[in-house]
Amino acid sequence: MGVVKTVERSATVAFSPTASYLAAGTMAGAIDLSFSANACLEIFKLDYRSSSTEMPSAGASVATSERFHRLVWGTTGLESNTHPLGIIAGGLVDGVVNLWDPSQIINSGSDEAGDPLVAKLQKHTGPVKGLE
């Protein structure tokens, strides 16, 4: 069996529940090929019609304060169209849970794009290792 699609990242991932996108957050406790200490959230377009194994980026990457232990893509906001692609929740190393609007990340180059960070929840004193 061959490779279908790849992204060269050390990341935890979440699939969009409604569209052909994949969110990737820099994984905690992993070292990437560039030995970078940066952390970010990226969204990639899943295009299975393309013969290329590379997944194109969908919008700009979003810098984060810490690396990710967990990443979840939910459907909150779909029914009211306040968040057309739902919400991405990320559990970070420092105990923060951030919520992002993926449609704002994907449209980051347009005039309609706003701040993709919807909320920052600081309730935990240790790393957030579970989300659902």
Image (spheres, grey):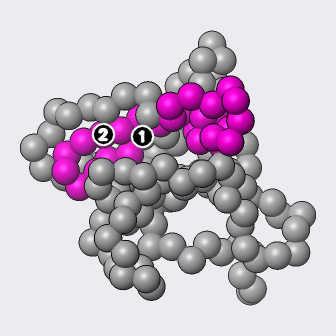
**Residue 97 shows which numbered tag?**
2
Where residue 49 sits, quadrant-wise, is bottom right
Q: Residue at x 15, y 39 (%)?
A: 124
The magenta segment is: 90-116
Q: Nearer the viewer, residue 19 or 64?
A: 64
Image spot of residue 75 (x, y percent): 57, 30
Q: What numbered label is drawn on residue 89?
A: 1
Above/below status of 94 relative to 75 = below
| Rendered location of residue 11, percent (x, y) | 45, 66
Sequence order check: which comes first, mark 1 or mark 2? 1
Residue nearer the viewer, 1 or 9: 9
Q: Regarding mark 2 in the picture, which secondary structure is present there? A: strand
Q: Residue at x 75, y 86 (%)?
A: 2
| Residue 104 place in picture, x, y as percent | 60, 34
Instruction: Name, please, the residue furthest toward the top.
Output: 80
Amino acid type indicated by mark 2: Val
Query: For residue 16, what is the image quadrant?
Result: top right
In the picture, the quarter occupied by the N terminus is bottom right
Callout 1 secondary element: strand
Q: Give how far apart the Cα atoms at labels 1 and 2 are.
A: 7 Å
**Labelled pair 1, 2 in contact (Cβ < 8 Å):** yes
User: Residue 97 lies in magenta, yes or no?
Assistant: yes
Q: Can residue 48 be seen in the rendering of this structure?
A: yes
Left/right placement of residue 85 relative to residue 12 reads right
Q: Amino acid at mark 1?
A: Ala
Left or right of residue 28, residue 5 in this image: right
Task: State yes or no: residue 40 in magenta.
Answer: no
Q: From what the image shows, is residue 116 above or below residue 65? A: above
Q: Residue at x 29, y 55 (%)?
A: 66
User: x, y percentage for residue 74?
Assistant: 52, 36
